[in-house]
Image (spheres, helix red, strand yellow):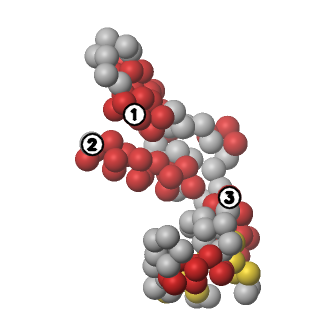
Amino acid sequence: MRWQQGGSLRNENILFGKNGGTLQRQFLKINAEGKVPVIKFDEKWVSDSDIITQILEEKYPIPQLVTPREKATVGLKIFSTFIGFLKSKDPNDGTEQALLSELSTFNDYFNKNGPFVNRKDISVADLSLGPKFYHLEIA
């Protein structure tokens, strides 16, 4: 999908082919590194998430999505401790307790500061955490 002027998304229908297939070559023609996400701004393709966020902030400053530096670490360790817990083969290695501790810390933060990482304003941190919590829920 691609962001268009005016705030709508348009699907470009560029699929990923295997082993150098036509569709993969077509994608690599516009994005040599093959990275996703990728978005086109002013006739230039950008594939770095941080730069994409920065450009979106500059082009569409309201609502502001930048997470303040002092809040950028909220929930940062949840997904990595979750992966550690999933990969663990030893129920006594502390990975379950580490995950529960991270979730508890996060919950305490939200009870005092929520409903978003940046209090009443949604930020990039919230948008990043959403899919991670979805994975926690379905796992």
Pointer 3 residue:
50
The reply to whether discs 3 and 2 touch (Cβ–Cβ < 8 Å) is no
Circle 3 residues within 10 Å: few <14, some 14–19, many ≥20: few
Q: Position of residue 46 (x, y in %)?
A: 69, 72
66 lies above or below 91: below
Pointer 2 residue:
139
Q: Quadrant of the C terminus?
A: top left
Q: Position of residue 120 (x, y in %)?
A: 51, 51
Separation of marks 2 and 1 at Cα, in angstroms: 10 Å
Residue at 46% in and 48% down: 129
**Between disc 3 and disc 1, whose residue precedes?**
3
Which residue extends farthest left?
138
Pointer 1 residue:
82
Amino acid type shown at disc 3: Asp
Separation of marks 3 and 2 at Cα, in angstroms: 28 Å
Q: Position of residue 93 (x, y in %)?
A: 37, 13
Which residue extends farthest front?
19
Amino acid type shown at disc 1: Phe
Kindly state the secondary structure of the residue where label 1 is placed: helix
Kindly state the secondary structure of the residue where label 2 is placed: loop
The reply to whether discs 2 and 1 touch (Cβ–Cβ < 8 Å) is yes
